[in-house]
Every structure is written in C-alpha cells, then in structure tokens.
C-alpha cells in the first residue's frame, strides 16, 4: 500500500515488514525526509520514537511530544509512553547516547508483544554512532530489533551521512532506501557501487 503525502511516496505495507535507510551528504534533506515519513506513519496510527542527537527535530517535526535528556551520572529520567515522542539526546556525549538508546530499545523489547494495537517505528538520527558495528554490547538491542522486530511490530529507520558507515547487516535488511547526495570519498562510492552497480 504505497501512499503519497507531501509529494513523498512511501510503502506502508513494506514498512511493516522491513527497515528503512536514509543516506546522503550534509544538507541533503535527510532529516526533513525522515520527519515526512514520521508524519505519514502517524496518520496511519503508528507510534514513532525519534532519537535526535542534533537537537533540530522539535522545530521541524510534527511529532507532538519531545523530551530533552540531560546528562546524569548513573541514570536518566525517561518518560515511558505509548504516544509518538522525540528524545532529544543532543546534550549527551556519544558514548552516553549509545547507552541511552540501547536501554530504551531494551525496554521496548521487554514491554511490547506480538499483538500491540499500534505499530512502532524507531528513527535514529546520525545512525553511524550506533550502527558501525552492531555486534557490540551497546548495540545488541538494535541488532535484535532490526532482525526480528517485526515480531514485536517494530521497525527501525536509520539516518546516516554515508552508507559505508553502517554495518552491512542492517543495510541488507532495509527494503526501503532513500539516497541523497553521495559523499565524494572513494570508500563511500565503492560501498554504493557494491549495492547498486556502476550506474
């Protein structure tokens, strides 16, 4: 069931079965594209959780709620919600962002069942921070959800500047892919050609 909203074609049926990848260089519209996808999904009664380490989502997204996560030594005061929400994690160091995201995904896995009323899309800005190597301790819940999240009616969207910066296991599990401006660095071009050929 492909829907066109805001001049964007997005396959809702495919999103139920697969993950989503958005890549492109700086200022190529990746975040605005992800916000449009989030808007479409909400219109079809999906819950959307966005992890925003840039601090811009609350200005450009129509997700109704957001919370700013402040650095704490041992814990974060985190709202648990069944509504769409932006987690602004821009005040956390990247190492803390990884731990925070992993802990939220752990909670999601433990609290969702196969019969949830709402489907859930998790959107990760600057996903290369979490997905360079998804076999590490701070990414094990990403690995689990990207692989079998469909059983929990949960899918992932990764936003990255460069396809080469993500673990290839995730890319292979993305049937929906949007690619913007390709970075000129040779490794980025090589990675792109390995998936799509020289054309």
Image (cartoon, rainbow, N blue to C red):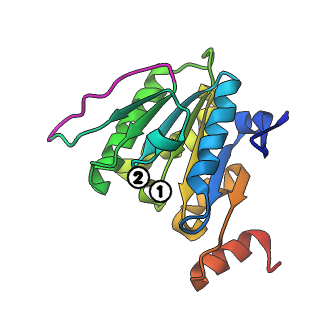
Residue in view at x 73 percent, y 76 percent: 193
Among the 4 quarters of the image, the one containing residue 35: top right
Mark 1 neighbour density, 10 Å: few (under 14) some (14–19) many (20 or more): some
Q: Which of 123 and 91 is in front in this view?
A: 91
Outermost front residue: 59
Measure how far apart labels 2 and 1 are at the Cα level: 8 Å
Q: Which of 23 and 26 is in front in this view?
A: 26
Relative vertical location of residue 6 with respect to residue 129 in this rendering, above or below: above
Q: Nearer the viewer, residue 191 or 121?
A: 121
Magenta stretch encompasses residue 123: no
Identify the residue under disc 1: 126
Q: In the image, residue 79 lies at what x, y percent?
A: 34, 24
Asked which secondary structure carries label 1, the reply is: loop
Among the 4 quarters of the image, the one containing residue 5: top right
Residue in view at x 32 percent, y 45 percent: 99
Instruction: Judge from the rendering whether residue 35 lies leftward or rightward of residue 58; answer left or right.
Output: right
C-beta proximity under 8 Å, tags 2 and 1: yes
Instruction: Judge from the rendering whether residue 174 lies leftward or rightward of residue 185; answer left or right.
Output: right
Q: In the image, residue 2 lies at what x, y percent?
A: 84, 37
Outermost left residue: 73
Asked which secondary structure carries label 2, the reply is: loop
Q: In the image, residue 59 lies at what x, y percent?
A: 47, 42
Q: In the image, residue 100 lies at what x, y percent?
A: 33, 41
Identify the residue under disc 2: 54
For the record, the magenta segment spans 73-83
Mark nearer the N terminus (2 vs 1) = 2
């Amino acid at each position: 069931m492909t829907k066109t909203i805001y001049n964007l074609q997005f396959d809702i049926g495919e999103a139920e079965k697969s993950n989503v990848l958005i890549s492109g260089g700086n200022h190529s519209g990746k975040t605005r594209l992800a916000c449009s996808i989030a808007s479409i999904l909400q219109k079809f009664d999906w819950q959307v959780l966005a992890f925003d380490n840039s601090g811009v989502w609350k200005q450009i997204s129509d997700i109704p709620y957001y919370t700013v996560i402040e650095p704490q030594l041992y814990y974060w005061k985190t709202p648990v919600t069944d509504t769409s929400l932006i987690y602004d994690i821009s005040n956390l160091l990247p190492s803390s962002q990884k731990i925070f995201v992993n802990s939220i995904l752990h909670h999601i896995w433990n609290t969702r069942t196969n019969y949830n009323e709402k489907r859930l899309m998790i959107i990760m800005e600057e996903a290369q921070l979490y997905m360079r190597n998804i076999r590490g301790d701070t990414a094990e819940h990403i690995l689990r959800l990207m692989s079998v999240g469909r059983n929990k009616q949960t899918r992932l969207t990764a936003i990255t500047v460069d396809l080469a910066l993500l673990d290839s296991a995730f890319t292979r599990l993305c049937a929906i892919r949007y690619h913007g401006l390709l970075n000129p660095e040779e490794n980025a071009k090589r990675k792109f050609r390995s998936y799509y050929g020289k054309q």
